[in-house]
Image (cartoon, coloured by chain):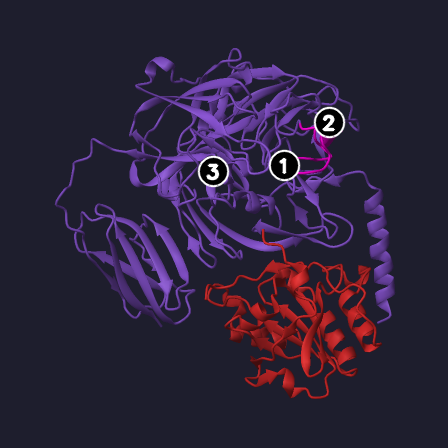
């Protein structure tokens, strides 16, 4: 089992990207000049654990977009093997689940590799510092997938709140739990 | 929303109640009967503990798959769909079938692929199981919960007055244990789990009727052995081993069960009061070193809270008897004719080797030959009766399993062969400083290409290379030295729902068909496909596909392109 090497991710600079959303429009970080940071969430249709988070993602996006931290969801699943994760199925899922955030198609898996995303869901908070995007948090959204009402630790929201307050993120890494992202050989 | 706090309150109350309850209801796996079996392997999750869910993998479910009911004489067809994020295999443990259908390390199922093995059920009525067998990943995939029971029924067993109402007086019990990290994820830092799971249920209890009850026990541990019995030390009777019923019930108060082994027992609850309870327990304290799970530590590489202690397996509450209850113990069961040492024309010996402890130590192997996927270690002639002898003058016990056949244990160097293991076996325990011999006949299925496995069923040992492979060859078949591979055509092309194959020569046989799409995904893997009804391609997306057909006689691969409309 390959465990994520926590120490290599945080405070890393990640590159901007340009990925197609479900409406066919390409979305890049630079399209949001006012953003202080982003929530980047790697999800996919076929993973039942990732499916548990859709309403929480809508809520996070509603709340934090107003504060300059929009949410972008990225599907980096291997679509050669998972028909459920193909572009048409992403469009269908976004419609069915009323996604209020961009759902982006990382067909070549390049963005997931750059972020070192391991699981779906795998959450990141990136923050703009001197014109660069720095990873400030990575790991789980919270500590209960199936029961949002029983969550004890809102790791992701806490990290954003602390960054918005100009503080260091207290818990900047947790273990992302979900389905392993299968990377194709390049 | 106003309802939410109320809902949350109810949920918290329910959780509080369940936290107080000592036991959880035992999960009885669903059954699938008939001759076509659809098995979907997926990543999923289970609420094992308070807090977050545990990521697992399931077959048609979340942890531990359905029980497949086979009738002897039927041809069973499996549609195994791998939706996991990793390649896997599915091995039909104990089934006598062609090697290309066996689901061993060579019959890999890539992600997104349907594998369709089939075979005629010739095994006798007994308890078998299925599980992943991908070399070096068996431990991880078993850990996730992949596997399930197979129950074979036959007329001889059906004629006996034995309990056989599934889930009522005939209960399958898959024994294993798991450890959890702080996030409730499974860990296998040690192969010995801290918490007992039966059919995927933690701290299970079950109501069983006040009569003779049949328990089908299967050890699906990664490593731990069980020395089980009942809390009141009552006598129970072993009626069946891995491969079939014994000649007669064998009374015992304790018996051992190592990874991969099955045993069917009868226990009499007829004298118990309704409402009373007893526990099925592991009496694992005080086992000699070498018995897996006898290690003293509670933490570290081989530590566990369940090591070297007695612990509950299943809490049994006695309920009212059912109509048609079995109330007497049969005096005899079936009439088995076993092979003896005198029948064997080939004798093989093997030794447990390596397994040097400590950092940098070598993993266990057989005859100093760690498993290599491309190396055939032994060749067996079709219909040969062979005696295999394994000697374990090494540091630890093992659970030896061989594919293809059921064998008869004929000798143990440490004493007489135990009466409770006197039946047909495919897996046995070999302790430290012990030599065990069995005799088996290798019938029906010759294939010079796809091998069968023999290995230690302790998953870390198997993954570490304590495994070998043998092919069964038919030397009596006519040598075909100058044979040309046949050819074939596919129609209609383009096709919509079914694709038909026409062979150029009626004598030509198809060994394998693989269908891939234009971006390289394997759609179907069809060992020795039955082609009369065509191949169902209705679920394929429109596009170009490639069929690779392997000719049986020459093993030459012939590729054709077709279009799905």
| Disc 2 + disc 3, Cβ < 8 Å | no
> Furthest-left residue in view?
B482
- Residue B287, x across and y down, in percent: 66, 21
Return the residue at label 2. Answer: B309
Q: Please name whichever residue, B290 or B20, is drawn nearer the observer in this view of the structure.
A: B290
Query: In terms of secondary structure, where does tag 3 sit?
Result: loop
* As drawn, B236 above or below A24: above
Distance from label 2 to label 1 (Cα)?
A: 29 Å
Q: Quadrant of the N terminus of chain B?
A: bottom right
* Residue A130, image quadrant: bottom right
| Disc 3 + disc 1, Cβ < 8 Å | no
- Residue B487, x across and y down, in percent: 19, 56
Q: What is the crowding at mark 2: few (fewer than 14 residues within 10 Å), some, or many (at least 20)?
A: some
Mark closest to the chain's N terminus, 2 or 3: 2
* As drawn, B82 above or below B259: below
Distance from label 2 to label 3 (Cα)?
A: 30 Å
What chain letter is assigned to the residue under label 2?
Answer: B
Return the residue at label 1. Answer: B167
Query: In terms of secondary structure, where does tag 1 sit?
Result: loop
* As drawn, B376 above or below B270: below
Q: Which chain is purple?
A: B
Which residue is at a point 81% across and 61% down the rendered structure image?
A153
Mark closest to the chain's N terminus, 2 or 1: 1
Q: In the rendered structure, does residue B303 fall within the stretch colored magenta?
A: yes
Distance from label 3 to label 1 (Cα)?
A: 38 Å
B46 relative position to B373: left or right: right
B318 relative position to A108: left or right: right
- Where does the magenta region start and end? B295-320
């Amino acid at each position: 089992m390959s465990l994520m090497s926590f120490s290599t991710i945080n405070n890393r600079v990640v590159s901007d990207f340009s990925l197609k959303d479900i409406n066919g429009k390409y979305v890049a970080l630079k399209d949001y000049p006012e953003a202080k940071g982003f929530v980047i969430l790697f999800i996919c249709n076929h993973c039942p654990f990732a499916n548990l988070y859709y309403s929480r993602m809508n809520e996070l996006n509603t709340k934090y977009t107003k504060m300059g931290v929009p949410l972008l969801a990225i599907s980096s699943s291997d679509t050669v093997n998972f028909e459920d994760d193909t572009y048409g199925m992403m469009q269908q899922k976004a419609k069915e689940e009323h996604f209020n955030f961009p759902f982006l198609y990382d067909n070549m898996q390049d963005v997931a590799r750059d972020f070192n995303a391991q699981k779906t869901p795998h959450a990141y908070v990136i923050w703009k510092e001197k014109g660069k995007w720095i990873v400030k948090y990575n790991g789980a959204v919270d500590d209960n997938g199936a029961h949002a009402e029983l969550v004890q630790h809102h790791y992701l929201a806490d990290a954003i709140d602390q960054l918005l307050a100009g503080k260091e993120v207290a818990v900047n890494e947790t273990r992302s739990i979900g389905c392993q992202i299968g990377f194709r050989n390049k | 929303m106003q309802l939410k706090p109320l809902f949350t309150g109810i949920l918290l109350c329910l959780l509080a109640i369940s936290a107080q309850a000592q036991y959880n209801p035992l999960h009885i796996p669903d059954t699938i009967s008939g001759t076509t079996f659809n098995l979907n392997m997926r990543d999923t999750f289970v609420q094992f503990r308070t807090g977050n869910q545990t990521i697992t993998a399931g077959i048609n479910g979340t942890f531990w798959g359905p029980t497949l009911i086979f009738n002897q004489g039927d041809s069973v067809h499996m549609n195994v769909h791998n939706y996991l994020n990793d390649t896997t295999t599915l091995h039909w443990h104990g089934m006598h079938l062609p090697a290309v259908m066996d689901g061993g390390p060579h019959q890999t199922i890539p992600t997104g692929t349907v594998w369709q093995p089939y075979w005629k059920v010739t095994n006798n009525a007994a308890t078998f199981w299925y599980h992943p067998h991908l070399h070096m990943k068996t431990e991880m995939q078993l850990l996730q919960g992949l596997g399930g029971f197979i129950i074979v029924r036959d007329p001889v067993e059906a004629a006996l007055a034995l309990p056989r109402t599934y889930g009522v007086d005939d209960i399958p019990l898959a024994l294993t244990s798991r450890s959890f990290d702080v996030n409730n994820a499974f860990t296998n830092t040690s192969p010995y789990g801290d918490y007992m799971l039966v059919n995927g249920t933690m701290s299970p209890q079950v109501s069983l009727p006040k009569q003779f009850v049949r328990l089908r026990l299967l050890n699906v541990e990664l490593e731990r052995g069980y020395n089980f019995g009942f809390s009141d030390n009552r006598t129970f009777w072993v009626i069946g081993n891995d491969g079939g019923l014994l000649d007669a019930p064998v009374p015992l108060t304790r018996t051992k069960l190592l990874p991969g082994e099955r045993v069917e027992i009868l226990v009499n609850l007829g004298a118990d009061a309704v409402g009373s309870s007893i526990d099925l327990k592991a009496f694992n304290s005080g086992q000699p070193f070498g018995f897996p799970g006898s290690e003293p530590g509670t933490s570290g590489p081989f530590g566990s809270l369940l090591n070297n202690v007695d612990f509950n397996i299943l809490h049994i509450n006695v309920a009212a008897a059912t109509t048609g209850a079995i109330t007497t113990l049969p005096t005899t069961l079936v009439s088995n004719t076993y092979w003896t040492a005198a029948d064997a024309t080939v004798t093989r010996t093997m030794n447990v080797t390596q397994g040097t402890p400590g950092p940098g130590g070598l993993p266990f192997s057989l005859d100093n030959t760690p498993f290599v996927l491309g190396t055939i270690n032994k060749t067996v002639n079709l219909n040969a009766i062979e005696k295999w002898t394994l000697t374990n003058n090494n540091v630890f016990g093992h659970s030896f399993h061989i594919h293809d056949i059921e064998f008869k244990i004929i000798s143990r160097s440490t004493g007489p062969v135990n009466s409770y293991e006197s039946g047909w076996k495919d897996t046995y325990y070999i302790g430290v400083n012990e030599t065990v011999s069995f005799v088996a006949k290798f019938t029906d299925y010759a294939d010079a290409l796809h091998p069968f496995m023999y290995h230690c069923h302790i998953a870390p040992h198997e993954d570490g290379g304590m495994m070998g492979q043998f092919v069964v060859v038919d030397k009596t078949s006519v040598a075909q030295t100058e044979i040309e591979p046949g050819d074939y055509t596919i129609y209609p092309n383009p096709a919509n729902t079914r694709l038909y194959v026409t062979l150029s020569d009626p004598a030509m046989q198809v060994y394998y068909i693989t269908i891939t799409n234009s971006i390289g995904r394997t759609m179907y893997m069809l060992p020795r496909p039955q082609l009369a009804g065509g191949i169902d391609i209705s679920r394929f997306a429109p596009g170009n596909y490639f069929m690779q057909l392997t000719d049986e006689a020459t093993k030459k691969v012939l590729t054709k392109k077709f279009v799905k409309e």
